[in-house]
Image (spheres, rainbow, N blue to C red):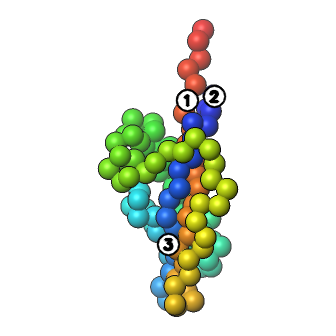
Amino acid sequence: MKTIAGYIVLTCKFHREGKQWVGENEELGVSSFGSSFEDANESLKELVVLHLNTLERLGERDRVFAENHIKVRSVKPKNPVSLNISAQSDHFVTPCVYPIQTRELQVA
């Protein structure tokens, strides 16, 4: 069983490259793409969750969080930061909130 241990706020950046939208998360060093902004956003969310789960499974989450100054918050932020839109209409930077889960040990 997993329980929520807290929340993290990561920076999600999006921009167009030709006909594709690219989504990037600098804190974790991952990126994805999609044919629309919505597709790129959803793809990036899924990728970040997979990456976080892998870090937890490998026991590397705390180290990566410390190296990248990722703070675990005990309460989900209601409005972490407003959406920033650059001068170019196809560049977006927004905060993304992710729950951090831990495995609860089962006692036999």
Image spot of residue 25 (x, y percent): 46, 64
Verify CB contact (< 8 Å) between mark 2 and mark 1.
yes
**Secondary element at image label 2:** loop
Residue 28 in sight: yes
Image spot of residue 40 (x, y percent): 58, 71
Q: Which amino acid, mark 1?
A: Arg
Q: Which residue is mark 1?
A: 103
Query: Could you tell me how far apart the alpha carbons at marks 2 and 1 are, in whole angstroms?
Result: 6 Å
**Residue 102 to residue 46: above or below:** above
Q: Which residue is mark 3?
A: 13
- Label 3 vs label 1, nearer the camera: 3
Q: Residue furthest top?
A: 108
Query: Could you tell me how far apart the alpha carbons at marks 3 and 1 are, in whole angstroms?
Result: 30 Å
**Secondary element at image label 1:** strand
Residue 1: mark: 2
Q: Quadrant of the N terminus?
A: top right
Residue at (46, 68) in percent of width and height: 24
Residue 82: mark: none
Q: Which amino acid, mark 2?
A: Met
Report the front residue among 42 and 84.
Answer: 84
Query: Could you tell me how far apart the alpha carbons at marks 2 and 3 are, in whole angstroms?
Result: 32 Å
Q: Quadrant of residue 104?
A: top right
Q: 10 Å neighbourhood of mark 1: few (<14), some, or many (≥20)?
A: few
Q: Which amino acid, mark 3?
A: Lys
**Residue 24 to residue 102: above or below:** below
Q: Earlier in the sequence, mark 2 or mark 1?
A: 2
